[in-house]
Image (spheres, rainbow, N blue to C red):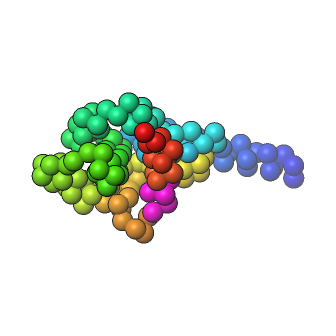
């Protein structure tokens, strides 16, 4: 019985590992992913942009081909705008509106078990505010200037 339990555990770990092999971590939004609770690469990159106050670079990500960067750009720019740290022009507001209503898929992760792809518009919807709550915590931690 003990060996059967160990075998099932090993098979389960292998299945999880192989099911994530096509996952592109460069296009994933996650503030505490994997067993170590580490941020995804786009989140780390945006952390640096926020700390350096590189708002022009953040604005440029509204036109990115990477949906994780688009999500983070919208999130950060709206926060900065609400704090009067940046003023968005009509062009930026239109891009933000388009992203917030987009059906393009974005990869999200949380912990070591949640890996999912959802439409961008879903992340800006109140029904899925777990990612936005994580984003709020992250933003407050790194945006103190």
Residue occupying the point 45% across, 47% down: 139
In the foreground, 95 or 139: 139
In this rendering, does residue 40 appear at all? Answer: yes
Q: Looking at the image, which is closer to me, 56 or 132?
A: 56
In the rendered image, the residue lying farthest to the right is 1
Q: Is residue 110 left or right of residue 55?
A: right
Q: Is residue 5 magenta?
A: no
State the residue lying farthest toward the bottom: 127
Q: Is residue 132 a member of the stretch shown in magenta?
A: yes
Quadrant containing the C terminus is: top left
Q: Which residues are magenta?
A: 129-134
Residue 2 x %, y %: 87, 49
Q: Residue at x 18, y 53 (%)?
A: 93
Image x and y of residue 89, in percent = 15, 49
In the displayed structure image, the side of residue 90 where residue 102 appears, left or right: right
Q: Residue at x 21, y 57 (%)?
A: 97
Q: Quadrant of residue 60?
A: top left
Q: Describe residue 87's horizontal placement relative to residue 114 as left or right.
A: left
Horizontal and vertical percent position of residue 100: 27, 58
- Of residue 106 and residue 30, the one placed in the foreground of this image is 30
Q: Is most of the magenta stretch helix, strand or loop? A: helix
Q: How many marks?
A: 0
The answer to whether residue 45 is seen in the rendering is: no
- Name which residue lies at 24% across and 35% down: 56
Q: Is residue 118 above or below residue 36?
A: below
| Residue 34 in picture, x, y percent from top left | 59, 42
Indicate whether 30 appears above or below 42: below
């Amino acid at each position: 019985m003990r060996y059967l339990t160990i075998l099932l555990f090993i098979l389960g770990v292998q299945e999880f590992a192989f099911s994530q092999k096509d996952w592109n971590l460069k296009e994933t939004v996650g503030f505490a992913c994997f067993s170590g609770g580490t941020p995804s690469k786009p989140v780390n990159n945006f952390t640096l942009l926020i700390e350096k106050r590189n708002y022009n670079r953040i604005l440029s990500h509204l036109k990115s081909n990477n949906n994780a960067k688009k999500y983070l750009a919208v999130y950060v720019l709206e926060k900065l705008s609400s704090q009067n740290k940046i003023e968005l022009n009509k062009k930026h507001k239109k891009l933000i509106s388009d992203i917030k209503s987009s059906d393009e898929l974005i990869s999200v992760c949380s912990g070591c078990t949640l890996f999912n792809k959802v439409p961008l518009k879903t992340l800006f919807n109140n029904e899925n505010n777990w990612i936005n709550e994580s984003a709020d915590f992250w933003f407050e931690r790194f945006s103190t200037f």
